[in-house]
């Protein structure tokens, strides 16, 4: 039985359809990256899984519990790390953890708090108010709060959004250690590198639907081939190169000031100019090709 | 999992306690000082110069007992309105709590209980202060925290429901001006309402604050049989506003 199952799920907000016939299964023990641009429906999907949003159509099952009727039971077995920091800033680090240990009905609250402090590496700051912590410490505490009851399933909603690269890398290490412990993780993100680094499988989401899914390497092979050639040149020259590549059926995408010819290993007759920089195709190529959005 | 689990309600209240420990001094300071100022202004100032006795009571006793209601409404409606709005909109606290095995009904119940417990305690402060100014202790006063608690349940429910209904925090001004302040006009807090026009006297019977004032005076100076009806009214008020608050918050918090 998968940890998470969504079948034909639709969620509308007035005239806007945020989730549009979503089918998604997350097997136990993997980290699935839900990758998509802003507004793709990732956060709404997360809220549907916690029962904080109710689907207009479709069926949702989490750890064998049917939602929304058994949402409370499902929530008892999952941890949630939100996109926005909603810690109690005036309260101490240990009290933040203790409150959630009680909310999750943990029997030995003290042991759970100690475990959380160790995970977040905040042992020495246990009595400090959250307000006194750095941004990275607060994110680690948020993660520890979501794991205070040692859940088998963890929902991470954009876990490193807005963080600087050093803190992001630090958090990735923490998430990676959870994955290796066998915790099932569903992680929404719009950072390509995050999905590539952490996810066993990636589901690309756009306009409320999954548009492609697989292991990162499989997705790259299927949609982007082996190689991408990036061309940096004046706009007129880029237009000329693009036209030539597209005439050969190659996919071309914008890449900041450049263009990227995806699957350039198939190019013939000088479709890839000599000044192009050749590199291995990446998940970013897939993301931009399939969603039409610039990657972050 | 069943509805209204004590563990869920206790968990939410434990969060409130943890937060309260960080600001209890300032809240308690104003809760004690406010009745002192009012009693000096109304009880001693007005009582010594303009009004001597009201309804057979020294004016300071009349105002001191009436101020219990003031303390209860101020320590229930406003924390409920502002606290709920800030936690929901700005701090996103409820998003965190509702991601745990807690439902909206438990969340609202816990919030109302906590606010009402506090109001039950703070409501007694004017009585303590009044004793310094000459109010005699009476055994019935032991029931005052209970009366305050029940009344505060209704008013905190009102505050939560309002917070779940407004779009902007500024809109609380309308609620305060249109609904909260007028309650004092027909409560019998600072002046008796027996001599007021019939319409106002009828309106006072629909005012929970008035029933609290009368119950507190009953506790201090002797109950009447009709006081049981007042308790029943306040219990009904609390239950009705609890359900309205839960309903409004479900609409606000669950998409």
Image (tube, rainbow, N blue to C red):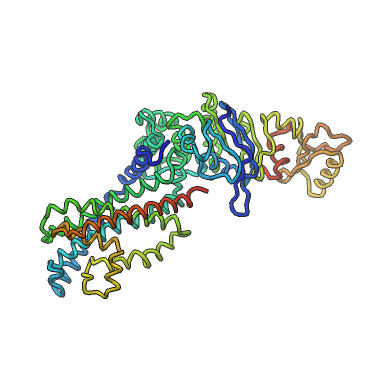
Instruction: Report whether A94 appears left or right of B50.
Output: right
- Between A18 and A120, which is closer to the camera in this rendering? A18
x and y, in percent, of residue A109 in the image: 36, 31
Regarding residue A279, the answer to whether it shows in the image is yes
Toward the top, the furthest residue is A181
Q: Residue at x 76, y 39 (%)?
A: A230
x and y, in percent, of residue A234 in the image: 78, 48
Q: Count the labels in the image.
A: 0
Vertical relation: B199 (above or below) B95: below
* The C terminus of chain A lies in quadrant: top right
Quadrant of residue B231 within the rendered picture: bottom left
Quadrant of residue B17 within the rendered picture: top left
Vertical relation: B91 (above or below) B54: above
x and y, in percent, of residue A158 in the image: 56, 40
- Between A26 and A257, which is closer to the camera in this rendering? A26
x and y, in percent, of residue A212 in the image: 69, 36
Q: Residue at x 39, y 37 (%)?
A: A103
- Between B114 and B21, which is closer to the camera in this rendering? B114
Regarding residue A170, the answer to whether it shows in the image is no
Instruction: Report whether B35 appears left or right of A295.
Output: left
* The N terminus of chain A lies in quadrant: top right
Toward the right, the furthest residue is A269
Q: Residue at x 73, y 40 (%)?
A: A289
- Between B195 and A197, which is closer to the camera in this rendering? B195
């Amino acid at each position: 039985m998968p940890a998470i199952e969504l079948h034909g799920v639709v969620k509308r907000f007035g005239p806007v359809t945020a989730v549009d016939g979503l089918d998604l299964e997350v097997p136990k023990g993997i980290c699935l990256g839900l990758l998509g641009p802003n507004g793709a429906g990732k956060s709404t999907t997360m809220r549907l899984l916690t029962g904080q949003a109710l689907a207009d159509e479709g069926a949702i099952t989490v750890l064998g519990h049917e939602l929304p009727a058994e949402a409370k039971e499902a929530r008892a077995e999952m941890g949630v790390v939100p996109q926005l920091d909603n810690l109690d800033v005036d309260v101490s680090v240990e009290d933040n953890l203790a409150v959630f240990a009680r909310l999750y009905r943990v029997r030995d609250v003290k042991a759970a708090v100690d475990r959380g402090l160790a995970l977040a590496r905040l042992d020495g700051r246990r009595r400090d108010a959250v307000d006194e912590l750095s941004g990275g410490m607060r994110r680690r505490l948020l993660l520890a709060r979501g794991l205070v009851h040692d859940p088998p399933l963890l929902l991470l909603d954009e876990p490193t959004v807005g963080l600087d690269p050093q803190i992001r890398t630090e958090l990735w290490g923490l998430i990676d250690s959870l994955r290796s412990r066998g915790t099932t993780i569903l992680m929404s993100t719009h950072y390509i590198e995050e999905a590539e680094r952490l996810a066993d499988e990636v589901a690309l989401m756009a306009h409320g639907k999954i548009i492609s899914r697989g292991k990162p390497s499989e997705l790259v092979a299927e949609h982007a081939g082996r190689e991408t050639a990036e061309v940096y040149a004046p706009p007129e020259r880029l237009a000329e190169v693009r036209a030539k590549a597209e005439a050969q059926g190659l996919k071309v995408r914008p890449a900041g000031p450049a263009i990227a010819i995806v699957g350039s290993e198939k190019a013939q007759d000088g479709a890839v100019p000599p000044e192009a920089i050749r590199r291995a195709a990446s998940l970013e190529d897939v993301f931009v090709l399939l969603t039409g959005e610039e990657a972050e | 999992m069943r509805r209204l689990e004590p563990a869920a309600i206790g968990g939410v209240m434990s969060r409130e306690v943890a937060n309260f420990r960080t600001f209890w001094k300032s809240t308690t300071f104003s809760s004690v000082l406010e009745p002192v100022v009012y009693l000096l202004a109304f009880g001693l100032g007005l009582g010594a110069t303009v009004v001597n006795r009201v309804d057979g009571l020294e004016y300071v006793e009349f105002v001191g007992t009436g101020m219990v209601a003031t303390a209860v409404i101020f320590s229930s409606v406003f924390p409920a309105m502002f606290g709920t709005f800030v936690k929901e909109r700005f701090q996103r606290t409820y998003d965190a709590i509702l991601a745990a095995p807690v439902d909206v009904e438990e969340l609202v119940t816990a919030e109302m209980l906590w606010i009402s417990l506090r109001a039950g305690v703070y409501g007694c402060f004017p009585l303590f202060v009044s004793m310094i100014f000459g109010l005699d202790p009476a055994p019935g006063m032991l029931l005052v925290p209970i009366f305050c608690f029940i009344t505060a349940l209704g008013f905190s429910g009102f505050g939560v429901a309002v917070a779940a209904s407004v779009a902007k925090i500024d809109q609380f001004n309308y609620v305060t001006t249109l609904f909260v302040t007028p309650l004092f006009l027909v409560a019998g807090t600072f002046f008796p309402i027996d001599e007021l026009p019939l319409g106002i006297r009828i309106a006072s019977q629909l005012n929970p604050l008035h029933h609290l004032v009368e119950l507190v005076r009953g506790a201090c100076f002797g109950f009447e049989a009709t006081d049981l009806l007042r308790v029943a009214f306040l219990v009904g008020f609390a239950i009705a506003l609890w359900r309205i608050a839960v309903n409004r918050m479900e609409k606000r918090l669950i998409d």
